[in-house]
Image (tube, rainbow, N blue to C red):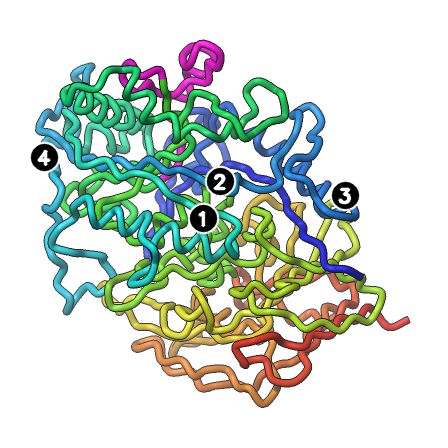
Amino acid sequence: MHPRRVTPALVTVLCALPILAAVPTPAAPGPGEPAAGADAGAFAERDHDLSHPFSERRRQRRDAAVRAMTEEPGPVSRTVPAGEAGRAETRPPAESRVFVILVEFGDRVDGPNGQRHDSRPGPRHNTIPAPDRARDTTTMWRPSYERDHYRDLFFGPGTVAPSLASYYLRQSAGRYSIDGEVADWVRVPYNEARYGNDACGRNVCRDVWALVRDALKAWYDGRAAEGLSAARIRERLASFDRWDRDDFDGDGNFDEPDGYLDNVEIVHAGVDKAQGGGEQGRGAIWSHRWYAEADQVGRTGPADNRAGGVPIGDSGMWVGDYTMQPENGGLGVIAHEFGHNLGLPDLYDRGDSAEGPPGFWSLMALGAYLGDEDGAGSLPGALSAWDKLQLGWLDVRVVDPTRKTVVQLAPNQSTGDPQALLIPLPPRPDGAKRWYIVENRQYVGADTTLVDGPYHLTAGKRVAIHFPYGEGVLIWLWDTAFTDNDVSRHPGEGLILPIDIHPDPLRDPTGKPLPTRFQIADAALTAKSEQTSAITLGHLGTFPSRPGTPTFTDTATAYWSQASPTAGVKVPHSGVQIHTEGPTRTGGATRVTITGPTP
């Protein structure tokens, strides 16, 4: 069979990335959410997957593109038919312009309707206190957060430290480039609690839309004060409007202006609520992605595209889609939220304190928190093969499981071909399709952070104890019967789950299985002589190395157990066998053999 690029389309997923130790609290319904009395077990999805009027159409387009990309032979075009949804993109534009605005808070504490939230003013930027490194090694901090820092963080060349631009350029193997502008700090009228409060009963409330509006107004007023006319400001912003992501005019052309800035990043002063919120506590803003003034769709917007959002002064340009993150946010959280901007979903279990089988294996799970002595999230991990497949950035070979196939599989972080294998499996009784995705994870590129980037926190402190994720051939089960990885609600089953080839659970000194992020550190196939890495986890114990496992057979039932139900995967028992030939920890390609069931 011949290598083929499989490229499911984009879907916007709006969510926040929680800290590893945080457990979300069930809350009241927010905008567009089910009424009181809805299943309490669903609160985490509702809390972080903030829908808007375009969500369903984007989902339809994604599903149509998935069908086309996995069922039709031959090369794939940039757009494909999507039924009632028109056409669907199979990959994002090759180039993106990103508008970044830095926002600090004012002293007014009352909202426009007189409601009073937290009375603390601000915060201003550069007021985050330095962490006590004896008790906190995970919080990102520097003495000064000025414009040049964010220019390097978003658009730097990546020669000294990775940037958003260099990260995505490398993850896409040169297929996607980012540039843009960082607007200097502006000040909005109100304190952070006016915008970040949880009065609606959720981590993110509609009040945060006012921050988008106030920040853009402050930026526009600043340019007007410099003597720029509305027309000149519009001309300056025009280069940020190249992508008609919703094909508003129905012509099937996504590479055209739609009156809305394509990629807007708002960086706010202070600490992320997902990290405790600092001095602002519950009044702080939770990092997220959403659509501003979504309730105004059909009423406001450019004259020919009433898609809601907020205006940028009198420029005639608007903002709908946006992401928001804190002043001291590392590249991990920025890259993760930008992944949502491109259409990638969260892969962690949103109802189980960020646990779930993906662990640190993907940026869209805990991989956003990988880092070094600079703090959690300073050196984010790679996108998984599935993530890249969704964006059209993966050279993948479709393998017929009924025939023996031998492949030299290139590392995930290379430009080799193929970078992954896609193995079709028998569908579920209801017709839902399933595949195995096989990738080769080596300590190269962004995966070098897996050597000692994964971590857990010392009891009672925010001091990280680091441990390795091992190299080798990683196997994922992709199951379209699910739309999330919330294994706390459906144990052993989810949208895209890595299979732990060493499923016997690691246990703490009391005999309790360790959390999932530890269990799947040795998930990859390796030669038997290539032992797993020993792990030392402080008060949780020390765990010696184990022999490597070179073969996966999905007729076995050992990859999920009731003892550790959120760590394992219920495989479909199709008889597919995946075997590694020779050493796998070479930093290069690995020989993989695929066979089907024995007649």
Residues marked 1 and 4 touching at CB (< 8 Å): no
- Residue 104 as seen in the image, left or right of residue 570: left
Q: Which numbered disc covers residue 42?
A: 2
User: In the rendered view of the protein, which quadrant contains the N terminus?
Assistant: bottom right
The residue that appears at 60% across and 48% down in the rendered structure is 392
Q: Which quadrant of the view contains residue 398? A: bottom right
Instruction: Look at the picture and state if 455 lies above or below 31.
Output: below
Instruction: Look at the picture and state if 383 lies above or below 125.
Output: below
Q: Amino acid at mark 4?
A: Arg
Crowding at dot 2, Cα within 10 Å, few <14 / some 14-19 / many 20+, comes out as: some
The one nearer the camera, 196 or 117, is: 196
For the question of whether residue 578 can be seen, the reply is: yes
Residues marked 2 and 1 touching at CB (< 8 Å): yes
Instruction: Look at the picture and state if 420 lies above or below 336.
Output: below
Q: Amino acid at mark 3?
A: Asp
**How far apart are the alpha carbons under marks 2 and 1?**
8 Å
Crowding at dot 3, Cα within 10 Å, few <14 / some 14-19 / many 20+, comes out as: few
Crowding at dot 4, Cα within 10 Å, few <14 / some 14-19 / many 20+, comes out as: some
Q: Which quadrant of the view contains residue 106? A: top left
For the question of whether residue 460 can be seen, the reply is: no
Which badge, 2 or 1, comes first in the chain's sequence? 2
Q: Which numbered disc covers residue 430?
A: 3
**How far apart are the alpha carbons under marks 1 and 4?**
31 Å
**How far apart are the alpha carbons under marks 4 and 3?**
55 Å
Tag in front: 2 or 4: 4
Magenta span = 288-316
Tell me the element at label 4: loop
Label 4, on which residue?
A: 120
Label 1, on which residue?
A: 351
**How far apart are the alpha carbons under marks 1 and 3?**
26 Å
**How far apart are the alpha carbons under marks 2 and 4?**
33 Å
Q: Which numbered disc covers residue 433?
A: none
